[in-house]
Image: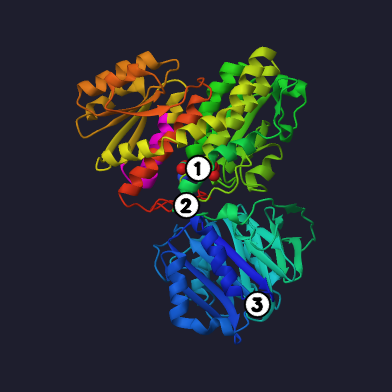
Amino acid sequence: MCGIVGYIGKKRNAIDTLIDGLKRLEYRGYDSAGFAVINNNKIKTIKETGKVVGLQRKLQEEWSEYKDTSINLGIAHTRWATHGEPNHDNCHPHCDNNEKFAIVHNGIIENYQALKTQLELKGCKFNSETDSEVIVHLISECFEGDLAQAVAATVKKLEGTFGIAAIALEDSNSMVVARSGSPIAIGIGNDETIVASDIAALVAYTKRVIFLDDDDLAVITADGVDIRTLNNVPVSRETTHIDWDTTDAEKGGYEHFMMKEIYEQPTAISNSIRGRLDFKLETAVLNGLNFTPIEMAQINRIIIAACGTSMHAGMVGEYYFEDLASIPTEVEQAAEFRYRNPIIEKNSLVLAISQSGETADTLAAVKEAQNKGAIVAGLCNVVGSTIARETGRGVYLHAGPEIGVASTKAFTCQTTVLLMLALKLGRNRRLSGQDGMKLIKEINNISTLVETVLEQADNIAQIAKKYAKMNNFFFIGRGYLFPAALEGALKLKEISYVHAEGYHAAELKHGPIALLEESVPVLALANDIAGKDKIIGNMQECRARKSPVIATATIGDKSIEEHSDDIIWIPECSEFVAPIVTVVALQLFSYYFAYERGCDIDQPRNLAKSVTVE
Ligand code: M6R
């Protein structure tokens, strides 16, 4: 949460690069935005509440001639408020009382209150309610002529998580960054260096990126980067080549990133699969897991730790691993995993699923699992993200950047990868070559099936429009479609702000059915797979309570018509593929529903793309 950007170089105006970077990071938080640059021997800051476009407007109003000045160094921030409401004073960057230093911060300083009290006793004046402001006052207090030394001394006093970028008026040729728990990526350009919380802000300028590790501090200049520990011991970090394109992180003619990403799914899924199906050995090839066949055969339990959409993908994975590989599997909400003191046995595999690879609770679960001696693997989309690096083994989705706050292509790629992993684990056990090949063919066909769903977009839009005034929804499913129902409800509530609950269809009668009435539609996932007959019964129960029923049904399955008011048609597929394909239809339903209600689809209120706080 929160995005930070820093620029140093002579190639372009720092402010334009900072604003461009903020726009690309806005999905990390959009409560307020601001930047600080060194100009005319002063630190100049401009801040504005709300989105980056507001900051841009303010820049034009207050300093339209900035382009005439050569500004080589600056830091910027887009905020997701934790401490203090999103007002002007709480916007980053924050300056010390003499305006000689400025910082931007992503993360949470847990001991800020104690530090603030100590600083206030020494006469320091605070201008905001944020936890972050203590950082800049501490830097000012610790400064003895060297910003890197002052930042090192400061961060040693901090408890919590941080990614920090700091500048000092005395030194307009460098910037200092440090991290503990919140990501910092450094883009190495020619005569310029760009720093950001996320590579999305860097790929327009360079493809060469260094990711800082926890407790690293780096002095950034236009010529490169000097990384050291907090005790000033030089360390070297590998340079990663990023293959994302700038256009991957732009809307490409779509009105919203969410829609672009929904439509990208056939390609994204193909990219997740590419080179990973072995037709000869009738299995999947997932080299990043780094398991020998013997190690793999020893895995006797799988625990999946994840949050939100990634957790729903994990729930589909649970069915896969048990059905195809006979490995007992459980899914844990990652925060619960961390605090519940889970029992980890020898040969337990903990699989952390995270699109961003930065989710704080999932990262904490990874650390807890490692601490307890589990084999830990990551399933991430963002290359070089903290979870991907922390786990050291795993599978990348290769879905390309997901910018819309509502996760879409991550879900379908995660489930596809989980299916490939189940195939691999299954073939390593009892799954026959024949069944392996059958599955390979199904996996290979997922993109085509998703395209068929996308062709139904107009029909889905009509249905969404028809129900767009309703304020309460239930999504119900069974078996493989139960996690899909949870994901459908999550999508609807997060982008349209209507109350939507996902339930196991059988659970409805154990309480929630009391809420059913004419104004509460039920979206029943009634595809022609195991459990269909039972869900038809549940649909009848709903209609008997006057709830309108929208069903998903397999193309050509007329039997659903008499039990539903509206139907979203899904192409025929096995139960393994059904949740992947059906969720695409639910994504479209939510999109059109939210669109009809005039919601801010890519940046829903109160949300941020990567949840880097507990
Ligand atoms: O980056 P992650 O996959 O770890 O994120 C987990 C959740 O925060 C995320 O899926 C969230 O639920 C999405 N907004 C759902 O659309």
Asked which quadrant contains residue 425, the reply is top right
Pick the front one: 296 or 206? 206
**Residue type beneath disc 2:** Tyr
Highlighted magenta segment, given as a residue range: 485-498
First reached walking from the N terminus: tag 1 or tag 2 = 2
**Helix, strand, or loop for circle 1?**
helix
- Left or right for 469, reference 370: left
Q: Do the residues labelled 3 and 1 touch (CB within 8 Å)?
A: no
Q: Mark 2 points at which residue?
A: 254
Q: Are marks 1 and 2 in contact (CB under 8 Å)?
A: yes
Q: Name the residue under label 3.
A: 72
| Magenta span dominant secondary structure | helix
Q: Using a 10 Å C-alpha cutoff, classify the residue at mark 3 as few (fewer than 14 neighbours), some (14 to 19) or many (20 or more).
A: many
Is residue 486 inside the magenta stretch? yes
Image spot of residue 550 (x, y percent): 31, 29
Which residue: 62% across, 67% down?
6
Image spot of residue 344 (x, y percent): 62, 27
Can residue 198 be seen here? The reply is no
Which residue: 35% across, 22% down?
505
| Up/down of 610 relative to 548, above or below | below
Can residue 215 be seen here? The reply is yes
Is residue 516 inside the magenta stretch? no
Q: Which mark is residue 263?
A: 1
Pick the front one: 463 or 20? 463
- Left or right for 267, reference 525: right
**Residue type beneath disc 1:** Tyr
**Helix, strand, or loop for circle 2?**
loop
Which residue: 72% across, 65% down?
189
From the image, state whether disc 3 or disc 2 is nearer to you. Answer: 2
